[in-house]
Image (cartoon, rainbow, N blue to C red):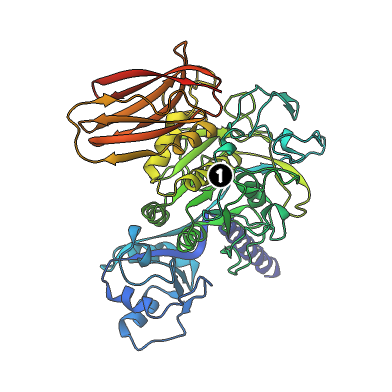
Amino acid sequence: MKTTSYSYILIIIFAFSFNVIAKAQQNYHPERIIIKFKSGSQIFSQLKSLVPKTPSGSYFTENKRTDQPALNKFFSYFKIRSIRAVMPDATTGSLAGGVERIFIAEINDGDFLNSVITSLQSSPYIEYAEKDFKGEGSGKKVECSSLEKNNSSIIPNDPMFNLQWGLRNTGQTVNGSVGIPGADINITNGWNVSTGVESIKLAILDSGIPPGASEFSGRILDGYDYANNDNDPTDDQGHGTNVTSIAAAKGNNNSLVAGMNWNCKIIPVKILDANNSGFYTWWISGITFAISNGAKVLNMSVGGSSYSQALADAVTFAYSSGAVVVVSMMNNNNNIPYYPAAFDNVIAIGAMNNRNNRAVPFCWGGGSSYGSHIDFIAPGDMILGLDAFNPTLTNYWCGTSQATPMVSGLISLMFGVNNTLTFEQVYQKIKEYAVDQIGPPSEDSLGFDSYFGWGRVNAEATLNAVNVSVGNYSTSIPETFSLHQNFPNPFNPTTKIRFDIVRSDFTTIIIYDVLGKEVKKLVNEFLTPGSYEVVLNATDYPSGTYHYMVSSGSFIETKSMIVLK
């Protein structure tokens, strides 16, 4: 009898241990459900009047019984222990993606998770119910101490800038790999257009930020930590600090590194824990928090393999608010879709190395993921940033996580030049000036391909294009197409070009040198009938004769002009 009892005890212990391990390995929270109510449903209206109105994440719990029988029955029938709103400060009014109707519920017993979800999905007042899936950050730190140091001073004057090949690749050696000059995001001349403005808010949804880092001094706005459910988004992992450094470290301040945008405000939103993983509910709440606090650009260097309609709805909400969500493709060297990268209305970024190749492998292994949902590629291997635990030091990280903030930083610069840009205009400008066919022909074919997207992001050309203002000085329809002589002519450094179009059409003005080589695409957009004026800045042009050609539909005309310095 004793032997038999002992065997039963071992079996029970084994079964319990197996169950604990299995739950720990699940890619979703064992007791949490995302619920979206149908518009106008009674339960939704009653809940909105009861749940907390702040982003503190505090729940309305079942022990707070109400005088609403239907609501009490809802808690009891679906075994709900507590519930809160994804967007707690929203009213019952309709928002894009229906985010005001999305709630996060915790149930009493995880063993009933699947059955509760099935029951909710069949309820007449529920639009959908789904598990709270888990994803992760898409970058890893280099765990070695043999990387070269540098104390030189290059414009910008940050001491480590020469090692930031992703911003300026001169062919320098990084971790034993000799780079190809020009294989970078091409930002140094772009900084002549803008180094960023304080009015633009860039939200970094990641593992947090070191609050005392001098590179972000005076620029960090109030954020939130959804991993620990408090208002202290301090980085306890390192991923978020590196990502924020790439996008927004102060440049030309003689301190460590330079980011893409030197002046924008930063909203830190912690959606990854100390293990570099996070639940979708954190990500969804982080998106709505960032938009509610005025973010124009959201960087999400994260991804999860499970589809979520609630996460898609949150992205729709961000898109409809006029913000741009920039996301990473992940690092699995395959075409398996990850989310949010595979959603519409985001910009999905892959990673390249300092030799113009897709980053395969990264410094730690893996490789930049690919697929039909990729949009662009940017530097992402051996990318320098601040150390989270001692922000007076730096370290290297590798992954599509590092390529993504290169692009979100650029987009925040674009908004600083023109804050009326739409998602489509931002996308089109980056696409128009992306550098194509830089990688091996087996992967990087002409036009769009699933490895490089539309090509390597070209920050300088994109910012110059955004900086051009096409002014409509007369909306009356002209009698004929015409291109006027620029004035003044000769000129230094600016001149005005006027042109008339009689039909709505896609219109371009291209500047050529005397040998017929394209110098700049000054205008490249759809215009309605009218008379227009555009300013050409030739500060960087040598003296000489140039030609400018306007093309609108079948109308094409060319004139000459002289830069005289």
Task: Name the residue rendered at 43%, 24% in the picture.
Answer: 489
**Three-letter amino acid code at the position of disc 1:** Gly
Which of the 4 image quarters holds residue 469? top left
Vertical side of 69 occupied by 228: above or below: above
Depth order, front residue of 429/71: 429
On the image, which quarter does residue 552 sit in? top left
Residue sitting at the far top: 515
Residue located at (42% from left, 41% from top) = 426
User: Is there any visible trace of residue 234 in the rendered image?
Assistant: yes
Q: Residue at coordinates 19% horizontally, 26% vertically from top-left? A: 480
Q: Position of residue 195 (x, y in %)?
A: 59, 44
Which residue is disc 1 drawn over? 409
Q: Residues within 10 Å of mark 1 (few under 14, many from 20)?
A: many
Residue toward you, 337 or 225:
225
The relative height of residue 351 versus residue 77 in the rendered view (above or below) is above
Left or right, 91 with reference to 452: left
Residue 516, image x and y in percent? 44, 12
Assign the N terminus to one quadrant of the image. bottom right
Classify 74 as above or below 255.
Answer: below
Measured along the vertical axis of the image, is residue 470 above or below residue 127?
above
Element type at marker 1?
A: helix
- Find residue 184 and report its horizontal and vertical position in percent: 60, 29
Q: Position of residue 53 (x, y in %)?
A: 45, 76
- Quadrant of the frame with the C terminus: top right
Residue nearest the viewer, comparing 409 with 379: 409
In this rendering, position of residue 217 left or right of residue 27: right
Confirm whether residue 334 shows in the render.
no
